[in-house]
Image: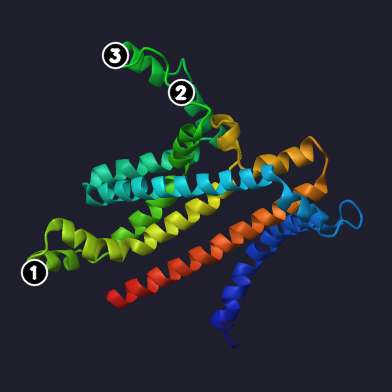
Amino acid sequence: MSQPRTGSLHWLLIMPLLCLLALFFVAPLYFVIERGFTDPAGAGLDNYRRVLDDPAARRFAWNTVRTAVTVTVCASLLGYTYAYATFKASRRMRVFLLYCVLVPFWTSLLVRTYAWAVMLRDEGVINKTLASLGMIDAPLPLLRNSFAVTLGMTQILLPFVILPCYSAMTRVDVSLVQAARSLGASPTKAFFRVFLPLTRPGLAAGAFLTFILATGYYITPVLLGGPGDQPIAVLIENAVQQQGDWGLAGALAALTTVMVLVALMAGWRSLTRSVLETGRKS
C-alpha cells in the first residue's frame, strides 16, 4: 500500500484549521464588508466616499496608526532588552523571567486594562506614592491621554515581542560572538555587529505581530485614552450600535482591513528579507 506524499499529508493536517478560519473569520468579514456596498440598496461606493470625505474618520485612522507605531517601537525596545536579559541570566532566573512573561496570558485583558486605570488615576497608586514622597503637589495627569494608552498597550503586547526574540537568541551560536571578541571587537561592537543581526528575524517577527495586534485594539484605548486617542474601531462600534448604519461600518471595516493587509505585506517582506540575510551570514 503506497504511502501518501508529504505535501498531501501537510494539506490534510492543515485543512481543518483552514476550514475553521474560513467559517469563523473570513465569512463574517466578507458579509460585513459586503454591507459597505449594498446597505442601503444600491449604495455602491457611496459609503466609501463618506468615509474618505469625513474628517473624523481620517483623524481616527491617524490615531490608530500613530498608536500602533508608538506601541510597536516601545514594545520592541523593551521586549528585546528583556529577552536579552533573560538569555544572559542563570537557568533558575531565566525560568522565573519567562514565567513573568507568561503570567499576563492567564489574566483577562479587561482586568489588566482596569488595573492600569486604577494605578494611573488621580487617586491611584502612582500619584499617591509620589505625593507621599513630596515629589508632587498636585496629581499628575496620567490617565485619559496618549501616555496611558501607550503604557497599557505596550505592557499587554510585550510578550509578543519577548518570546520571538528569546527564541531567536537561543538559536544563536555563541561561539560567533566569542570569535568576534577574540579578534579585537569590544563587547558593544560584537553585540551590534554579530549578535543583533543574527537575532533580527525574531525582533522583526515580534514587531510585525505587535503592530498588527495594536491596529485592532479597542478596549485599552477606550478605557485609558482621551477623546483624541480613540481608534477607528470606536467609529465602527458607533456606526453599528448607535446609528445602525451597517453600510458605513462595512466601509470602515473594509478600509481598515486594507490598511492591515498592506502592513502584513510590508512586514512579511521585511521579515523574509531578514531571515534570508541572516541565513547568508550564518
**Please, is residue 117 above or below residue 181 in the view?**
above
Q: CB under 8 Å between callouts 3 and 1?
A: no
Residue at position x 33%, y 71% in the image? 278
* Label 3 sits on residue: 133
**What residue is at 32 percent from the left and 11 percent from the top?**
132
- Mark linked to residue 106: none
Give the secondary structure at mark 3: loop
Mark 3 / mark 1, whichever is N-terminal: 3
Image coordinates for residue 140, horizontal then vertical, percent? 42, 21
Residue lying at 62% horizontally and 48% vertically, measured from the top left: 61
- Marks 3/1: CA–CA distance: 50 Å
Badge 2 is on which residue?
141
Front in this rendered view, residue 217 or 247: 247
Task: Say if 229 sits above or below 174 in the image.
Answer: above
Secondary structure beneath dot 2 equals: loop
Residue 171 in view in this figure: no
Q: Amino acid at mark 2?
A: Pro
Q: Position of residue 232 (x, y in %)?
A: 64, 44
Tell how many labels: 3
Tell me, for residue 183, which label it has, or none: 1
Instruction: Tell me which corner region of the image, top left, top right, bottom left or bottom right, holds residue 169.
Output: bottom left
Q: Earlier in the sequence, mark 2 or mark 3?
A: 3
Frontmost of labels 2 and 3 is 2
Q: Looking at the image, which is closer to me, 178 or 268?
A: 268
